[in-house]
Image (cartoon, rainbow, N blue to C red):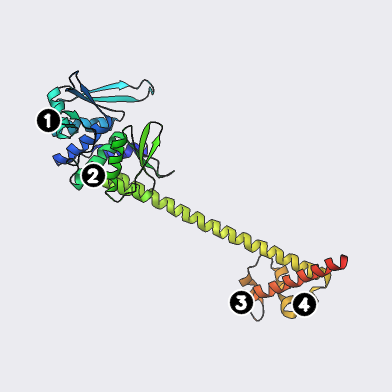
Amino acid sequence: MSFSSKVKDELARHIGEARHCRIAEIAAIINVCGKIKENEKGEVISLKIQTENAAVARKCFTLLKKTFNIKVEISIKKNIYLKKHRIYHIYVMDSEEALTILKVTRLLVDGKVNRHISPLIVQTTCCKRAYIRGAFLASGSISDPEKTYHLEFVSQEEKHTIELMRLVNTFEMDAKIVLRKKYYVLYLKEGNQIVDLLNIMEAHVALMELENLRILKEMRNNVNRIVNCETANINKTVSAAVKQLQDISYIDQTIGLGTLPENLESIARLRIEHSDASLTELGQLLDPTVGKSGVNHRLRKISQIAEKLKSTREEFHD
């Protein structure tokens, strides 16, 4: 099961105790994936909700039965485009019952279908949470958090998407909208905001799983950074040691190490004998011992002498 399916499965099991919250959630589901059938006079005769998620279908059925105590029918059909998938249809065939649902959810105002988020439906924080939860169940998805952080709601209705964005952003989110072909996509890409939204929708199990994955991911990234840093330092140290050995060898072949001042000769010979040693380790081998900066200073002096000898030789040949 994908992470997105896990989230929806958890949300589908959440049935609010408060009737007003259930109404808000039903309003969101109908707004996103509900179809209102009208007769020639424009009168509502039935209501249909369509989804490809079995858990969402079960929740729609339960919410409608528990909230309105009405007869709800459900049918299952194969998706002609994706044969392994099924499409679930939840029907309210009684026109009076369909009318009641639409009026209570404020999706029918003054006899006209109103595909907006009514402020009356989302007056309280708990109802705002419920509406967002319903919208996610009907049109949302979340990526595998081990790969990337991305949560989105997809709709063909621009106005509803804008209203949903404003509703989500009342919880101090930074949701944005992008047009993808003919769909309006409301999305979040920050891991911490996705965690917050899961909390808002009350998907607490999924939230904990995501947080654990985020911690592991951060730990892996930190370890990689440390390893990369240490590798870079090792490479830098090795390159410096190779250069030092080359300079010492050049001096030895031209004027001899014995011509160097005693403090430089001693560090040069130690570097030859201990080519893998760090500057600190070289300093400890001297008598008296010398600190890292002192060893580095002496090796720089040797490098300067080697460069001067090379420069003089080039001038002589010219």
3D distance between C-alphas at marks 2 and 4: 79 Å
- Residue 211: x %, y % from top left: 35, 50
| Residue type indicated by callout 2 | Arg
Q: Residues within 10 Å of mark 1 (few under 14, many from 20)?
A: few
Please state if 186 lies on the left or on the right of 220 as rendered.
left
For marks 1 and 4, the one nearer the N-term is 1
Asked which secondary structure carries label 2, the reply is helix
Asked which secondary structure carries label 3, the reply is loop
Which of the 4 image quarters holds residue 282? bottom right
Residue at left offset 43%, top offset 50%: 217
Quadrant showing the N terminus: top left
**So how many labels did they put on this image?**
4
For marks 2 and 1, the one nearer the N-term is 1
Are the residues flagged by discs 1 and 4 in contact, CB closer than 8 Å? Answer: no
- Decide which of 38, 12 is in the foreground and name it: 38
3D distance between C-alphas at marks 4 and 3: 20 Å
Between marks 2 and 3 in the image, the one whose residue lies nearer the viewer: 2
- Decide which of 110, 213 is in the foreground and name it: 110
Asked which secondary structure carries label 4, the reply is loop
Are the residues flagged by discs 2 and 4 in contact, CB closer than 8 Å? Answer: no
- Decide which of 142, 317 is in the foreground and name it: 317
Residue bearing the label numbered 3: 291
Q: Which mark is residue 260?
A: 4
Residue bearing the label numbered 2: 129
For marks 2 and 4, the one nearer the N-term is 2
Residue bearing the label numbered 1: 69
3D distance between C-alphas at marks 1 and 4: 100 Å
Please state if 174 lies on the left or on the right of 238 as rendered.
left
- Residue 214: x %, y % from top left: 39, 50
Eyeballing the image, is 86 above or below 227?
above
